Amino acid sequence: MPVKYVFVTGGVVSGLGKGITAASLGRLLKARGYHVTMQKFDPYINIDPGTMNPVQHGEVFVTEDGVETDLDLGHYERFIDENLTKNSNVTTGKVYWTVLTKERRGDFGGGTVQVIPHITDEIKSRFHRSGEQTASGVSDPLQSDDMEIAIIEVGGTVGDIESQPFLEAIRQFQHDVGRENAILIHVTLVPYLKVSEELKTKPTQASVKDLQGMGIQPDIIVCRSELPLDDGIRSKIAQFCNVPKNHVLQNLDVEVLYELPLVMEQEHLAEVACESLHIPCPEPDLSEWSSMIESWKHPQKQVTVALVGKYISLHDAYISVVEALKHGGIAERATVNVHWVDSEELNEENVDEVLGSMQGILVPGGFGSRGVEGKILAAKYARENKIPYLGLCLGMQMAIVEFARHVLGYEDANSIELNPETKHPVIALMPDQEDIEDIGGTLRLGSYPCVLAEGSRSYELFGKKEIHERHRHRYEVNNAFRKELQEKGMNIVGTSPDNHIVEMIEIAGHPFYVGTQAHPEFKSRPNHAHPLFRGFIQAAVDKKISEEQQQK
């Protein structure tokens, strides 16, 4: 069967939720038995977001096969519960790099290299193809009668200069494969003017006209609005935008992000998409998803967890971590309140005031020296006060630095990333990273195996000896200090299969003190909470219950 394509564009303003709309459609189509994959095409010239400032761009999401991608891919994976790959995120930078490399090699035979056809051809070649390599490195095990649907989001908004090559490529592609095999969903804004108490359709009309001027006709229009669209508004948009009225759908704010697929099911999003693609639209099985939402909206407990980081001015910098905490809350029927703590402002004078009332402390990953002393202090406070602690990547490394300083007695203990002159480099550069000069795409990236120690808390949580987790780091625990750390009570409970790389640590006698070199947040799903986050929230709930009993 041929691949069916759904392109998703945005109009009027950015931040309308194209990615969430696309991901919701993916969930609805998967619930109908279709095989769904997703892609994001970003118009920026960076090769990938790996070297971009998290405060500007948000978190860098890492795929199973080790590629740094846009954070929207995290939403995709969490909604459709599928691992995406290196082919799932394409930037203008990647496209031009490939074309220019071909030109330097002489592939074009001395011909003039132009946006059309060379750039647009390269973009079209990157649209998903059936049987592409999966994250595990094997071909997609699709049967010949399986229908595969690729949902492709184009970043930016219609009218942006940067997005025009992508839109032109879509126009050509629709012509190549036929309109019945490639449809377009346009997500746009219908603003409400309080003065006149009216919803305004003109911005939507203008945005669609921009698309039409490029030779593209949207098949479905999804309207973001503060208020429900009445029949008159839908009719007006349909008339001016050349779509059937039942293809004008509203997308209102929802209480819970993951509720959107259920809301869009009521709007018949999947139904009109299937109609436009000329494929059957069987009844969906959304029982598991509905049950998850029910648990989320009707919690039985409540805990507060401190997230101690340096990028807290933009919460999107830690979006997967926050979502994973919420997933752990769903599993435990608990609301998780995130208390944002700027690690630069945490010190000995205020640490008790800031962290004393927390049921859990989490230190996420990161790079550079800014704010690390606050992270070390947070790890120390959690250890000494028996507060559940979860350290991710740098969060584990700083827990080890803290332990080396205050338990082993090495006052200058540090990571060589932060202090190359330290006499006690408990965190060292990985050997295969020593001669690397370029910083983009050169970290230890992607999924790697970890062997867990039987009897450890981590082994209990995962329920198996060998696990696979995603990584993004350049430094590792210095093996010269492993024996001392273990002798003093920091247990090495997870290592690489060859026992060279420390992957997970725990502190003996602590209710929950776990550090991992990995980024487990990337693998957590709302309907399948990651074991470490589930265990962390469970420990936080236990602490809350204990506190309440003591108060009685």
Image (tube, helix red, strand yellow):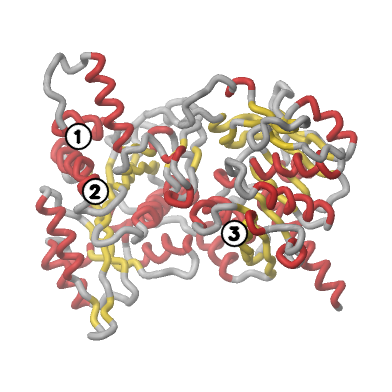
Name above or below for residue 253 compared with residue 485: below
Q: Amino acid at mark 1?
A: Thr
Q: Is residue 281 left or right of residue 549?
A: left
Q: For mark 2, what is the residue?
A: 277
Looking at the picture, how far across and down is residue 516, in whole percent?
68, 40
Q: For mark 1, what is the residue?
A: 120
Residue nearer the viewer, 497 or 430: 430
Q: Quadrant of the C terminus?
A: bottom right
Looking at the picture, how far across and down is residue 459, in whole percent?
76, 40
The span from disc 3 to disc 1 (Cα, nearest Å) is: 40 Å
Q: Amino acid at mark 2?
A: Leu
Q: Is residue 239 left or right of residue 228?
A: left
Q: Is residue 16 left or right of residue 406?
A: left
The span from disc 2 to disc 3 (Cα, nearest Å) is: 35 Å
| Location of residue 203 by image quarter | bottom left
Q: For mark 3, what is the residue?
A: 326
| Location of residue 450 by image quarter | top right
Q: Residue at x 24, y 45 (%)?
A: 162
| Location of residue 172 by image quarter | top left
Q: In this view, which residue lies farthest toward the front?
A: 421
The answer to whether any part of residue 527 appears in the image is no
Q: Secondary structure at mark 2?
A: helix
Residue nearer the viewer, 239 or 3: 239
The span from disc 2 to disc 1 (Cα, nearest Å) is: 23 Å
